[in-house]
C-alpha cells in the first residue's frame, strides 16, 4: 500500500475515533470511552509516524515547517495531561472538570496542528524519486 494511502487511512480513522471519543466522553458512556479514548491516542501516534514517513519525501519552506512543528509538538505533549487526567478521572470524579478542560485545550491545539500540517504540505514540493 502506498505511503499516501496508508496516511489517509490512518488520518480518517483517527478523526472518526476522536469524534467517537468526544461523544462517549461528553455523554459519560464510560465503558466505551475507556476503549475509544486510549485507542484514539494510539491511532494518533500511528498517524504521526505515517506523516513523518510521508513528509520525508517532501521539501518544505523552513518557516512553514517550524510553525507546524511547534503546534504538532505542543499537541503531542498535551496528550500526556489528557491521559493522566483521564486516569485520574477513572479513579475519582473530582478530575472531571480538569479532564474536560485539558481535552478541549488539546483538541484546539491538535486542530491547529492539523491545519498547519495541511498548510505545510500545500507549500511542499515532492522530491524526485
Image (spheres, helix red, strand yellow):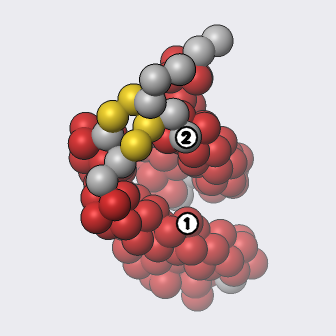
Residue pointed to by mark 2: 56
Above or below, comparing residue 6 to residue 54 in the picture = above
Residue 49 position in % (x across, y down): 64, 44
Look at discs 2 and 1 and give the one toward the viewer. Answer: 2
Q: Is residue 45 toward the left or the right of residue 62 in the image? A: right
Quadrant containing the N terminus in the rendered view: top right
Characterize the local packing of mark 2: few (<14), some (14-19) or many (20 or more) Cα atoms within 10 angstroms: few
Residue 55 position in % (x across, y down): 49, 40
- Earlier in the chain: of badge 2 and badge 1, it is 2
Residue extending farthest to the front is 128
Foreground of the two, 109 or 5: 5
Above or below, comparing residue 61 to residue 8 in the picture = below
- The reply to whether residue 68 is visible in this rendering is no
Taking the spot 64% from the left edge, 50% from the top edge, the residue there is 45
Foreground of the two, 103 or 119: 119
Residue pointed to by mark 1: 76
**Alpha carbons under labels 2 and 1: distance apart:** 19 Å
Characterize the local packing of mark 1: few (<14), some (14-19) or many (20 or more) Cα atoms within 10 angstroms: some
Residue extending farthest to the top is 1
Foreground of the two, 125 or 6: 125
Residue 88 position in % (x across, y down): 69, 80
Taking the spot 35% from the left edge, 48% from the top edge, the residue there is 60
Taking the spot 39% from the left edge, 29% from the top edge, the residue there is 126
Foreground of the two, 128 or 33: 128
Above or below, comparing residue 23 to residue 92 in the picture = above
Amino acid at each position: 500500500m502506498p505511503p499516501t494511502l496508508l496516511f489517509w487511512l490512518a488520518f480518517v480513522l483517527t478523526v472518526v475515533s476522536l469524534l467517537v471519543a468526544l461523544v462517549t466522553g461528553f455523554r459519560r458512556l464510560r465503558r466505551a470511552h475507556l476503549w475509544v479514548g486510549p485507542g484514539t491516542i494510539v491511532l494518533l501516534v500511528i498517524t504521526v509516524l505515517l506523516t513523518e514517513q510521508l513528509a520525508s519525501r517532501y521539501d518544505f519552506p523552513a518557516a512553514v515547517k517550524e510553525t507546524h512543528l511547534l503546534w504538532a509538538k505542543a499537541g503531542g505533549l498535551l496528550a500526556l495531561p489528557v491521559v493522566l487526567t483521564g486516569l485520574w478521572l477513572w479513579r475519582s470524579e473530582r478530575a472531571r472538570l480538569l479532564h474536560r478542560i485539558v481535552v478541549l485545550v488539546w483538541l484546539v491545539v491538535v486542530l491547529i496542528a492539523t491545519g498547519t500540517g495541511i498548510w505545510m504540505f500545500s507549500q511542499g514540493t515532492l522530491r524526485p524519486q
